[in-house]
Amino acid sequence: MPVSFANLITAEPSPQARRLLWHVLSVGRVWRDEPEHHAGADKAGLHLFWVVRGSGLLVTGDRRLNVSPGQGCWLVDLRQPRSYLPDEGRRLETAGFRFHGPGMDAWREALGNDVAFAFQGERELAALQRAQRVLLKLVRQRPADWEWRAHETINEVLGRLAATRELFQAAAAPTPEPVRRVLEAVFAQPDRDWQAAALAKISGVSYSRLRDVFKASRSETLHDFLRRTRLDEARRLLGDPTLTIKEVAARLHFSSEFYFSHFFRKASGLSPTQFRREPLG
C-alpha cells in the first residue's frame, strides 16, 4: 500500500460546532511510500503536521520545503494544491491534525496566506504534539463536552501560531480618541456602507484629519480597514446557507448582487459562489 490512512481518525463536527467553534476534522498519522498528491480545495481547513520518521519534500503552490524529524511543524492551507514526496527508498510518516472554524479566512490572511512555514524549537514542537494527543483522545472517547475542549485546544495552538508572527503586539501608544470613536461605530455596524461624512461626524474631526490619524495609529489606511471589515462580514453572512447571495448583498447595503459580487471577488479573489463551494469545515 503506497499511502496508508489507517491511523488517521476523522471527526464529523456537530452543526453548532461548525458554526461557533474551532473544530477538528481529522487527527492521527499517515505514512507514504510513494508521492501523495492533492488538488487544491479538495478538503477544508488547515493541516498542521510534523514528521515522525523518514524525510522528503512538501510542495505547495510554488514552495518546496524539506521536511524531516526534529525540524519543527508545518501548517498547510488545503485550498492550495500540495504534494508530500518521500525521499527515494524512505517511508515518510507524519502526524498532526486538520481543523477549521469561524474566521478561518481572516486567520489565513493574518498568517500570510502562503501558510506553509516551519515552527522551530523543541518546546513548540512538544506543545503541538501534546495538543494533538489531547485531540486524538477527545475524538476517540467523545465525552459530552469534547467539542468545546477541542475548541480550547485548537485555540491554544492558534495562540502559538499568532505568537510566531507577532500578530498581537501591544500598541505603542493609546488609540487616539477620533480613531476609537470610529472603531466603535464600525464594529457595531460592520455591514454598513460607511461614508466619509458620517465617519468625520462620529470622529469629531475633519475627514482628512481622521484619515491621517487613522493611518498613523493603525498602520493601515481607513479605506483598507473598512474594506476588510466589510469583507469579514460578507464571509460570515455567506456562511449562512439560509441566505441567498442577493440577500447577503442587501444586508451589506450593496445596490445590487452584481456590485456585491464585484466587491467580493476583488477583495478575496473568489466569487461569492466559489466561496460557498469550498469544502465545508
Image (cartoon, rainbow, N blue to C red):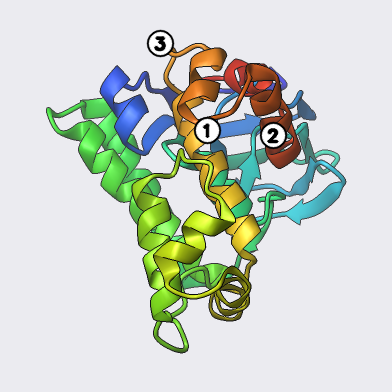
Q: Counting residues from the N terminus, which is met first, the one under dot 3 or under dot 1? A: 1
Relative side of 172 to 207, left or right = left
Q: In this view, does 162 lie above or below 105?
A: below
Whole-percent x and y of residue 135? Answer: 33, 40
Give, as a three-letter code, the residue at label 3.
Answer: Thr
Alpha carbons under labels 3 and 1: distance apart: 14 Å
User: Quick check: can you spot residue 28?
Assistant: no
Whole-percent x and y of residue 24? Answer: 39, 33
Q: Counting residues from the N terminus, which is met first, the one under dot 1 or under dot 2? A: 1
Residue that carries the numbered disc 3 in the rendered image: 242
Q: Which residue is drawn at 78% across and 39% down?
A: 86
Whole-percent x and y of residue 137? Answer: 27, 36
**SS at circle 1:** helix
Residue that carries the numbered disc 2 in the rendered image: 263
**SS at circle 3:** loop
Give, as a three-letter code, the residue at label 2.
Answer: Phe
Q: Is residue 40 above or below residue 151?
A: above
* Mark nearer the viewer, 3 or 2: 2
Alpha carbons under labels 1 and 2: distance apart: 10 Å
Which of the pair 273/99 is nearer the observer? Answer: 273
Q: Residue at x 60, y 81 (%)?
A: 216
Quarter of the figure with residue 130: bottom left
Q: Which residue is drawn at 47% across and 77% down?
A: 169
Q: Residue at x 63, y 68 (%)?
A: 220
Give, as a three-letter code, the residue at label 1.
Answer: Ala
Relative side of 280 to 58, left or right = left
Residue that carries the numbered disc 1 in the rendered image: 234
**SS at circle 2:** helix
Relative side of 250 to 109, left or right = left
Q: Is residue 165 above or below residue 106?
A: below
Q: Counting residues from the N terminus, which is met first, the one under dot 3 or under dot 2? A: 3
